Every structure is written in structure tokens, then in C-alpha cells.
């Protein structure tokens, strides 16, 4: 309320009090009372109008502030959503002499480690894993879930699965300063791997490479691996370990990088899911400890 309104109202009250006591100014009591009433009425109207203007002004300022805040939040949300539409991680290829070395898990593991700042030569990883060789009947003494089966310096008939790959990474990390931990996240649905990539973590996964021959090629089983205790282990034809290094949520595609052959491909989500699921959803990531 303005001060002028308060003063006018006070003057009107004094005038009424004087009238009630018969101490009018120069007019008759009736005239004085009428004048006082008129002053009170006019003053009240002015005061109400001023108060209304103040409330209206405050309300307008508040609405403006709320509108500005809403617009800012809206713009932030739009930027955040747009930033997550496409993610592509830069993982450097590892140079491999494919005439002399055949174990694709090792350069893939080296590329993953080097992404996090290590200086890993894939040959160094041979000392970080137990390697078992098959006998004359082509029977391995251990499962690829428990050791690396086959000789990676001899031929392509060698491989391991996610638990052995994870242990190999952690053995190297612990011998080279630590700070990170490899985690076996096998069983994770493909669409849930997006959160790992969004956080900057490439995902090592097992799959056939047959999709390089055409997206209409179906994954298939190879001959089962026989283990010394008489059990058999499922093996996928053309099995390989590669990296998921990006995704595009608008196009619904994933970027798959094969560091062993130095090639990347953009795969539709449904194609990659088919191959990923066929290899039992095996996947490994590295997290900062």
C-alpha cells in the first residue's frame, strides 16, 4: 500500500471524529459528514486501486519468472535427449600379424585395456591366462569357461568364453597399476547395454562374424567342443569376440568393431540381437574401481 493512501485515509478519519464531536470546520454538520464520507470513499478507492496494482505487478513478475524457469528446464531436457541420440566411442585398432597369431580374444582385450589408458601389447596377455591344448582325439582337458582352449599361435581353432576373458583382463590390470575392474555382465539384454555405452564403456561380446557376409545370413552352430570329463560345450560357427562401440537410437543401429581385422560395421538392432542372443548373451565391460 502507498504512503499517500495511508495519509489520506488518516485525514478522513480525523474529519469524521471532529464531526462526531460537533467540531466541524466551517460547514454545517450534515455538510461536514458528507464531505468526510466522500473523502473516506475516495481514499478507500484509491487505496484499493493502488493495492490491486501492486498485487497485479507482483503476480506478473512471478509468472514471468516461472515461465523463464520452465523454458530453461525444457531447453535442458531437449539438449540432454539430443545428446543421447547417438554415441560413438573411439577404440583404436590393434595391429595383428594374422599369419602368425590367431587368438582374436587377445587383441580385443588389448584394445579394451588401451581405451582406458593402459599400454597393452596383446602378446603380453598370453601370460595372464591359462592355456590348455587338445590331445590327439581333439579333446580339451578343460572347458572354455575355465581356461583358454587351443593354441593361439598355431591356428584359429582356439577360444575362450566370458569368465576366462574377464579373469585375463583383471590379471593384467592387477599387474599394471590397477584402478579398474573387468566385469562379466553376461545375460544382460542387448538394449540394456546402451547404458554402458552411454557411460563411455565399450562392451566386449561374443558372436559369429557371419553378418559380415550379409545381414540375411543366419548364425549357426559349429561342432560341439568335447571336454576331457565327457561333457560337451556349445560352440557357435565363426565365433568371435568383438566390441560394441556405439549406437544410434534414432536409426536403431549399433556400431560393432572387430579390432582383430580392423573393421567396423553398423548393424540394425534386430540383427545384432539375433547374433548376441544366439551366443548366449556373453558380454564383458571394464569399470573404474
Image (cartoon, rainbow, N blue to C red):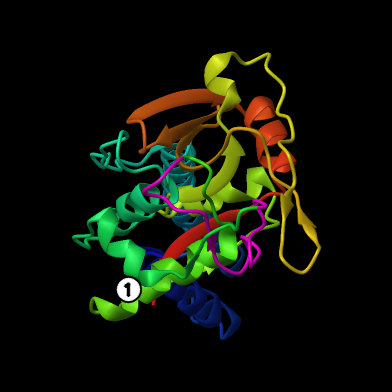
Q: 138 or 215, which lies in front?
A: 138
Q: Quadrant of residue 185?
A: bottom right
Residue 145 image point, x, y percent: 63, 64
Picture residue at 48% right of the left edge, 71% below the top: 167
- Label 1: few (<14), some (14–19) or many (≥20) C-alpha neighbours in 10 Å: some
Magenta stretch prevailing secondary structure:
loop
Q: 77 or 283, which lies in front?
A: 283
Q: 289 or 187, which lies in front?
A: 187
Q: Does 259 appear above or below 52?
A: above
Picture residue at 36% right of the left edge, 38% below the top: 260
Say what secondary structure mark 1 lies in: helix
Q: Quadrant of residue 33?
A: bottom right
In the rendered structure, the answer to whether residue 155 lies left or right of residue 281 reads: left
Picture residue at 62% right of the left edge, 64% below the top: 30
Q: How many numbered discs sit on the rendered protein? A: 1
Q: Is residue 288 visible?
A: no
Question: Which quadrant: the N terminus?
Answer: bottom left
Q: Does 183 appear above or below 19?
A: above
Q: Is residue 145 highlighted in magenta?
A: yes
Residue of label 1: 173
- Identify the magenta region: 137-155
Residue 155 image point, x, y percent: 44, 41
Amino acid at each position: 500500500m502507498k504512503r499517500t493512501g495511508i495519509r489520506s485515509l488518516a485525514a478522513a478519519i480525523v474529519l469524521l471524529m471532529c464531526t462526531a464531536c460537533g467540531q466541524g470546520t466551517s460547514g454545517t454538520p450534515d455538510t461536514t459528514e458528507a464531505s468526510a464520507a466522500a473523502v473516506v470513499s475516495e481514499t478507500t478507492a484509491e487505496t484499493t486501486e493502488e493495492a490491486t496494482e501492486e498485487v497485479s505487478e507482483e503476480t506478473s513478475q512471478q509468472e514471468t519468472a516461472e515461465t523463464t524457469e520452465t523454458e530453461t528446464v525444457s531447453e535442458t531436457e531437449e539438449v540432454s535427449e539430443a545428446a543421447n541420440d547417438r554415441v560413438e566411442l573411439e577404440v583404436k585398432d590393434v595391429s595383428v600379424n594374422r599369419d602368425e597369431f590367431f587368438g582374436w580374444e587377445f587383441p580385443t582385450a588389448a584394445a579394451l585395456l588401451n581405451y582406458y589408458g593402459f599400454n597393452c601389447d596383446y602378446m603380453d596377455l598370453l601370460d595372464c591366462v591359462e592355456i590348455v591344448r587338445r590331445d590327439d582325439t581333439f579333446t580339451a582337458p578343460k572347458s572354455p569357461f575355465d581356461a583358454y582352449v587351443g593354441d593361439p599361435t598355431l591356428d584359429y581353432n582356439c577360444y575362450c568364453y566370458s569368465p576366462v576373458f574377464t579373469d585375463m583382463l583383471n590379471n593384467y590390470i592387477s599387474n599394471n597399476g590397477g584402478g579398474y575392474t573387468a566385469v562379466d555382465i553376461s545375460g544382460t539384454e542387448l538394449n540394456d547395454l546402451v547404458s554402458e555405452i552411454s557411460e563411455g564403456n565399450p562392451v566386449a561380446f561374443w558372436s559369429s562374424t557371419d553378418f559380415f557376409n550379409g545381414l540375411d545370413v543366419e548364425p549357426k552352430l559349429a561342432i560341439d567342443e568335447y571336454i576331457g570329463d565327457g561333457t560337451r560345450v556349445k560352440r557357435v560357427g565363426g565365433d568371435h569376440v568383438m566390441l560394441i562401440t556405439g549406437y544410434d537410437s534414432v536409426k536403431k543401429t549399433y556400431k560393432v568393431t572387430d579390432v582383430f581385422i580392423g573393421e567396423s560395421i553398423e548393424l540394425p538392432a534386430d540383427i545384432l540381437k539375433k547374433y548376441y542372443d544366439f551366443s548366449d548373451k556373453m558380454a564383458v565391460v571394464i569399470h573404474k574401481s
